[in-house]
């Protein structure tokens, strides 16, 4: 992260992070994207104490919101490409 990104991340995360936390199974949150058939998740984000915060100090228009969503999409695209390369290298290699 750049210094600007670190500062913005610090602004978003204002609450101190406790050293130890206990969760109940029901506390687990999951967000996902369904596959084309609507029966299976193509991707998901899951965890305990999953918190999504947006820095509304710098999101002041629909264009800002779209830029934020596009940036998050890029983060997930890069994570997906990294996993594809690591786990399905033949998928990304051209066939002769």
Image: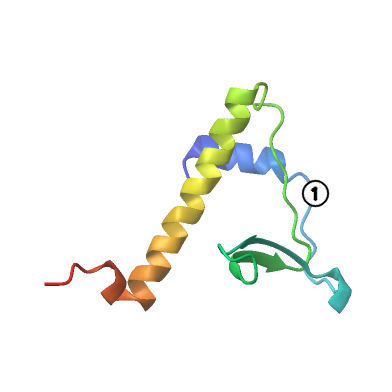
Q: How many marks?
A: 1
Quadrant in which the C terminus is drawn: bottom left
Instruction: Please provide percent x and percent y for residue 69.
Output: 58, 40
The residue depicted at 28 percent of the width and 67 percent of the height is 92
Image position of 4 with respect to 72: above or below? above
Residue farthest to the top, as pictured: 61
The residue depicted at 19 percent of the width and 67 percent of the height is 94
Q: Is residue 56 left or right of residue 68?
A: right
Question: Hey, which quadrant is residue 6 in on the image?
Answer: top right
Q: How many neighbours does mark 1 have within 10 angstroms: few (below 14), some (14-19), or many (20 or more)?
A: few
Question: Hey, which quadrant is residue 5 in on the image?
Answer: top right
The residue depicted at 30 percent of the width and 72 percent of the height is 91
**Of the pair 22 and 25, the residue shown nearer to us:** 25
Image position of 59 with respect to 14: above or below? above
Residue farthest to the front, as pictured: 37
**Of the pair 66 and 56, the residue shown nearer to us:** 66
Question: Hey, which quadrant is residue 93 in on the image?
Answer: bottom left
SS at circle 1 = loop
Task: Tell me the residue that label 1 is attached to.
Answer: 15
Image position of 96 with respect to 9: above or below? below
Instruction: Please provide percent x and percent y for residue 95.
Output: 17, 71
Q: Is residue 9 left or right of residue 89?
A: right
Instruction: Please provide percent x and percent y for residue 82.
Output: 39, 65
Residue farthest to the left, as pictured: 96
Image position of 53 with respect to 38: above or below? above
Color theme of the render: rainbow
**Of the pair 9 and 38, the residue shown nearer to us:** 38
Q: Is residue 44 left or right of residue 53?
A: left
């Amino acid at each position: 992260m750049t210094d600007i990104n670190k500062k913005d991340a610090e602004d978003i995360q204002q609450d101190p992070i406790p050293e130890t936390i206990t969760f109940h199974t029901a506390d687990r949150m999951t967000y996902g994207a369904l596959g084309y058939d609507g029966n299976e998740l193509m991707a998901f984000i899951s965890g305990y104490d999953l918190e999504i915060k947006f820095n509304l100090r710098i999101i002041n228009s629909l264009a800002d919101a779209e830029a934020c969503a596009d940036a998050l999409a890029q983060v997930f695209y890069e994570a997906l490409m990294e996993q594809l390369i690591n786990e399905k290298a033949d998928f990304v290699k051209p066939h002769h």
